[in-house]
Amino acid sequence: MTAAPIRLRAEDDEDLRIVSACLQDAILPIGDMGFLPDEKRFVMVVNRFRWESAGQPRPGPKADDDDEAPFERVHCGVRVEGVTGVKLRGIDVKDRSQILELLSLETVEGGGVALHFAGGGCVRLDGEGWRLLLEDLGEPWPTGCKPCHTLEE
């Protein structure tokens, strides 16, 4: 496993679809995201599931615990520039114990980006000419849990 860290930039819908795939199933405490209005910036640090290395054997000799923790997560910084406002739906920012699971990102009509979370929560970042920057931070760590989703009819 342990592929190179990723660094991505998104400035349109096509770019954002790629970033969304990389961030699918990222988890974060609600306190690890924030809006900096004076800087027109929204930031968050997530624990990103490394889909790009899922199912690949670790390099080097096989360890006894490889089957117990065959996947990886890594801290990942996400910054969205050009944000003029933030709207929340289904997220209680006063509940500091809340852990969010990011499902997808998409562009929204009128300019901006929507972050969709499990359980129906959404963060809408308003702003025309936005730019999203994503960068893995530090070394990945092993996990035995691979996210899965039930199919809805």
Image (cartoon, rainbow, N blue to C red):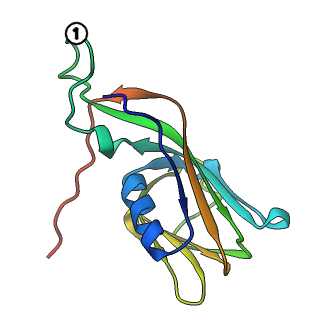
Q: Is residue 20 left or right of residue 35?
A: left
Q: Residue at coordinates 54% horizontally, 66% vertically from top-left?
A: 91
Quarter of the image with the C terminus in it: bottom left
Q: Position of residue 7 (x, y in %)?
A: 53, 47
Where 117 sits versus 86, above or below?
Answer: above
Q: How many marks?
A: 1
In the current view of this chain or complex, which residue is farthest to the bottom?
110
Q: Which residue is mark 1?
A: 61
Q: Secondary structure at mark 1?
A: loop
Q: Position of residue 121 (x, y in %)?
A: 47, 68
Where 110 sits versus 36, above or below?
Answer: below
Foreground residue among 53 and 64? 53
Foreground residue among 144 and 141? 141
In the current view of this chain or complex, which residue is farthest to the right?
38
Local packing at callout 1 (Cα closer than 10 Å; few below 14, some 14-19, many 20+) is few
Q: Position of residue 106 (x, y in %)?
A: 46, 74
Q: Quadrant of residue 103?
A: bottom left
Q: Quadrant of residue 37?
A: bottom right
Q: Amino acid at mark 1?
A: Pro
Q: Residue at coordinates 36% horizontally, 28% vertically from top-left?
A: 2
Q: Residue at coordinates 60% horizontally, 84% vertically from top-left?
A: 111
Q: Quadrant of residue 119?
A: bottom left
Foreground residue among 101 and 97? 101
Quarter of the image with the N terminus in it: top left
Q: Residue at coordinates 27% horizontally, 19% vertically from top-left?
A: 59
